[in-house]
Image (cartoon, rainbow, N blue to C red):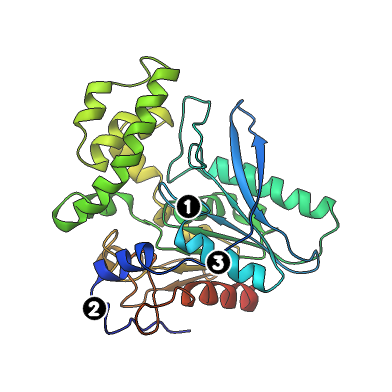
Amino acid sequence: MKYSAPFWLPSGHLQTIYPALLIRKPAVRFRRERWDTPDGDFIDIDFVDGAPDQPFVVLFHGLEGSSDSHYARALMAEAQARGWSGAVPHFRGCSGEANRAPRFYHSGDAAEIDWIIRRLHARRVAAGATGKFYATGVSLGGNALLCWLGESQHDAEFVNAACAVSAPLDLAQGGVSLSSGFNMVYTRMFLQTLKPKCVAKLQQFPGLFDLDALHAARDLYAFDNIVTAPLHGYRNTEDYWDRASAKHVLNDITVPTLVLNAKNDPFLPGRHLPQRASPRVVLDYPEHGGHVGFAVGGPPGRITWLPGKLIHFLEQHG
């Protein structure tokens, strides 16, 4: 399934922004569960329930995303239409309610992926479900999923196949890209929701980080240096961006995996995309598509290509 961008969305920015904001999202009937985490926190997971002999697909969302993100609704609507089951776990603090622990989530959160995905799979087994078990991730969630797949290697093979979409495979280069020019629009959008969460976190845990430095942060480099890195065991932004980049583990993945990144993705320009990976990994880098865009058709457009692409890969390789 080759992607061709509509003529009326001629740039990476339009291909990113228009599908996220202006294309109607399909309706999905979600069922929410709250899980207590091993560290005394909680996560909320939104499910679609299908037939036990049909596949199950989990989707890990992107930075400040949720089950309401356009890509999550698109994939889960397609799964629901096929009779599949699915789940969208929310990273800490992304389900509409502040989490309890002195942490949030991050691009290299393989331990969180591990706990969630193993529990989901164990429940499926205990319930006697026989359908295939698939894992997908978008943007930050895609990078974290790839990190888990690479670090787990053969221990991840209870997953039949996996897909990562628009993952920031090289966080340092992505950070540079998001720190200048028009791309600051995306940075400001992220900081508009991240900063209030951090202010609230300081009310829970006074002194956790420097409030004045947080307010002064104007890009993700500064934000990650103040909040993300120290809260999650990294020395600083450089250490976080290096160690959490999925590009380091692409050669270690043993589960059939699609890595889909548009070369005109404003978050990670094509010249920085890795060119080598494990034989089990398919690197698919179309010229166009933007960041988790991939709209098709005439105006107002549709967001059906991406879920179709992912499901086709999962069924062919799982």
Amino acid at the residue labelled 1: Gly
Residue 31, above or below 162: above
Q: Which residue is mark 1?
A: 141
Q: Residue furthest left?
A: 181
Amino acid at the residue labelled 2: Pro
What residue appears at the point 29 percent right and 41 percent down from the top-left corner? Answer: 191
Amino acid at the residue labelled 3: Leu
Residue 301, above or below 181: below
Cα separation between marks 2 and 3: 24 Å
Which of discs 3 and 1 lies nearer the camera? The answer is 3
Please state the horizontal and vertical placement of residue 228, each as a whole percent of the image. 37, 34
**In this rendering, would 251 be left or right of 292?**
right
Question: Which element carries disc 1, helix, strand or loop?
Answer: helix
Residue 224, above or below 286: above
Question: Which element carries disc 2, helix, strand or loop?
Answer: loop
- Could you say which disc has been placed on residue 75 in the image? 3
Q: Observer-nearest residue: 209 or 236? A: 209
